[in-house]
Amino acid sequence: MSEVAKYNFAPTPAVDAPSSTMTTTTSHVHTSPAQPHSHAAPRSSRSPRQPIGPSVIRPQGLGRILLSFGSHILVPLFLAVGMGLAYLGAFHAPTPHDLPVGIVGQGAATQVFAQTVTDQSDGALVTHVVSSTAEAERQVRDRELAAVYAPGTSGATLYVSTAASETTATAAQKIFMPIAYQAHLPFTVQDVVPSGEQDTTGQGLFFLLVALSVGGYASAIAVAAFAARLRPLWTAVIGLATAGVVAGIGIVIAGPLYGIITTHRWEIFLFAWMYDAIIVALGVGLHPLLGRWTTPILTMLFVMLNFTSSGGIFQPAFQPGFFAGLNTFWSGAAWLQAAQDLQYFPGASLGRSSLVLALWLAVAVLLCVVVHGLVARRARIARDREVTALEEEEVVAA
């Protein structure tokens, strides 16, 4: 028998044991070569414990994510609260207080009638005696009085100006119409200075103010973002040019396109340019201090407080005291009054509106100079420290 045959038929405990079967022999033949003669240890029924890590309920870095989200959500929450307080606070219940009106007539009877109207209004009206209907028209045209009531033997006439404020004219009609009805007098309304044919509500200039304001503060952020890369002279040039473009767009839309502005377009454009230059200058000045809070602060200044105090919807006599007070010196109110004077009241003085806008522009430019001067000084000090540290290292190395 050959050596190979002897090897193949040699008895082994695993294969040729009398109690083994063919099945057992086959299974042992396929035993893993790493352990041919040993039995596998019994496996545990419990899987190894996995280390604790991120999960769906608690992702990795959850605390930092929530903290970052909280810092970012503050801006929209600030806008939501501010818009609600400003618009609802200014417009939710417009009622007149100390509204200047007039009664046409002469003598003691007219004086008593005027005082009675004032007393019965419970602080809503301040009634003056006007000598004639011609004087009534003049005082309404000059915006000295909001409305003048002229009773006569055959009827009563109310002199108003929808160009000054359509809402005030409507409120005056509601006040004096019952008085004429009680006296059994036919009631008519004389619109001394009507609004334009393409501006039937008299609020077209107010909505132009909205466009100038939104375009202005959005442009201010863009200019401020590049101001750090430019020298002050180029920042001023780009800021003025951007303000002029925004103002020009608004005047073209309100003028030739929609016919709201029909006269003195260049003068209204210059006032709009100054108004937008104020917004851009404030944005450039505030951005190094406030960073991403610049946009909400500009929104507060030129939307929340600006539109509500401008008098474009309700005149100061219908506003709460806070917003009526802002109307006396806020930039939007000054621009709107100047635009209304140029469009509808050409004889009115522009001195007060010009002074308010000029003071705003001076403050905005001063802010830019101070803030960017401090930023430049801080950068220069940082560069000097770096140079000093480098020189000390060179000395040590030498």
Image (tube, rainbow, N blue to C red):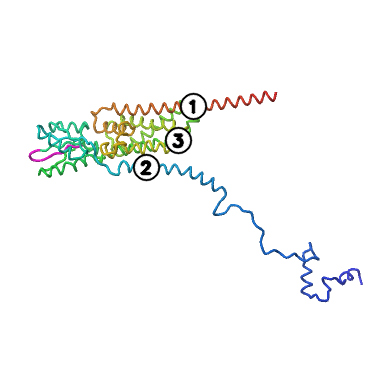
Q: Residues within 10 Å of mark 3 (few under 14, many from 20)?
A: some
Q: Amino acid at mark 3?
A: Ala
Q: What residue is at 66 percent from the left and 26 percent from the top?
A: 393
Q: Residues within 10 Å of mark 2 (few under 14, many from 20)?
A: some
Front position among marks 2 and 3: 2
Q: What residue is at 47 percent from the left and 38 percent from the top?
A: 292
**Is residue 267 on the magenta stretch?**
no
Helix, strand, or loop for circle 2? helix
Depth check: 80 or 190 in front? 80
What residue sits right under mark 3 in the picture? 222
The answer to which quarter of the image holds residue 150 is top left
Q: Find the magenta span and give its range.
A: 152-160
Helix, strand, or loop for circle 1? helix
Q: Which mark is residue 83?
A: 2
The answer to which quarter of the image holds residue 269 is top left
Earlier sequence position, callout 1 versus callout 2:
2
What residue sits right under mark 1 in the picture? 374
- Locate residue 306, reporting x and y percent: 34, 36
Residue 180 drawn above or below residue 19: above
Q: CA distance from mark 2 to mark 3?
A: 23 Å
- Locate residue 25, reporting x and y percent: 79, 72
- Quadrant containing the C terminus is top right
Horizontal side, residue 354 vs residue 224: left or right: left
Q: Amino acid at mark 2?
A: Met
The answer to which quarter of the image holds residue 172 is top left
Earlier sequence position, callout 2 versus callout 3:
2
Earlier sequence position, callout 3 versus callout 1:
3
Q: Which mark is residue 262?
A: none
**Is residue 158 on the magenta stretch?**
yes
- Locate residue 293, reporting x and y percent: 45, 37
Q: CA distance from mark 1 to mark 2?
A: 33 Å
